[in-house]
Image (tube, grey):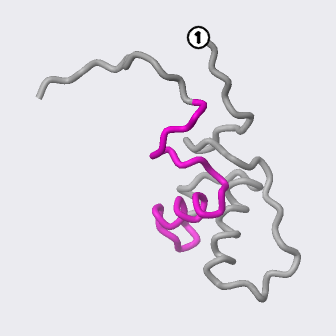
């Protein structure tokens, strides 16, 4: 079985939807939350910092991940993607 994966790369456990992020030249008129989200995305994609380092700017892990998802930088791992392989479950079943 052949599976075609998207061309995006993996960074810090997330599959990137974008490998480069273009920031607006003038962002002073943007909402402060959007400015923070863009800064988070820039550090994650363009600079290549892991989430553990980005949380050092004062944002918590869920806020950083939410920003990456909302800005379309990473794929949502909670939802099945079309490119994921289908077939038999290979993990061992555990007895309760």
Q: Nearer the viewer, residue 82 or 10?
A: 82
- Left or right of 32 on screen, residue 87: left
Q: Residue furthest front?
A: 82
User: On the rendered structure, is 7 left or right of 26?
Assistant: left
**Disc 1: CA contacts within 10 A as few (<14), some (14-19) or many (>=20):** few
Closer to us: 63 or 77:
77
Quarter holding the N terminus is top right
Instruction: Return the x and y of residue 66 as percentages of the image width and height.
Output: 52, 63
Mark 1 lies on a secondary structure that is loop
Residue under the image location 48 percent in, 44 percent down: 79
The extreme left residue here reads: 96
Task: List x then y, in percent, for residue 2.
Answer: 63, 14
> What are the residue bounds of the magenta stretch?
55-83
Query: In the image, what residue occupies the spot 59% across and 47% down?
Result: 75
Residue with the mark numbered 1: 1
Looking at the image, residue 12 lies above or below residue 46: above
Residue 66 counted in the magenta span: yes
Q: Quick check: 84 above or below 23?
A: above
> Residue at the spot x=71%, y=39% of the render?
8
Residue drawn 68% across the image and 62% down it: 41
| Residue 28 in the image: above or below residue 73 | below
Left/right of residue 20 with respect to residue 81 in the rendered view? right
Q: Quadrant of residue 95?
A: top left
- Image spot of residue 53 (x, y percent): 58, 58
Residue found at the very far top of the displayed protein: 1
Which residue is most to the right? 25
- Would residue 56 be counted in the magenta stretch? yes
């Amino acid at each position: 079985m052949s599976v075609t994966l998207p061309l995006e790369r993996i960074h810090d456990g997330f599959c990137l939807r974008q490998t480069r992020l273009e920031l607006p030249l003038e962002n002073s008129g943007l909402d402060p939350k959007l400015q923070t989200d863009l800064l988070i995305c820039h550090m994650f994609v363009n600079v290549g910092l892991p989430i553990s380092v980005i949380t050092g700017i004062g944002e918590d892990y869920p806020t950083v991940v939410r920003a990456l998802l909302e800005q379309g930088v990473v794929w949502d791992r909670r939802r099945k993607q079309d490119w994921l392989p289908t077939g038999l479950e290979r993990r061992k079943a555990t007895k309760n």
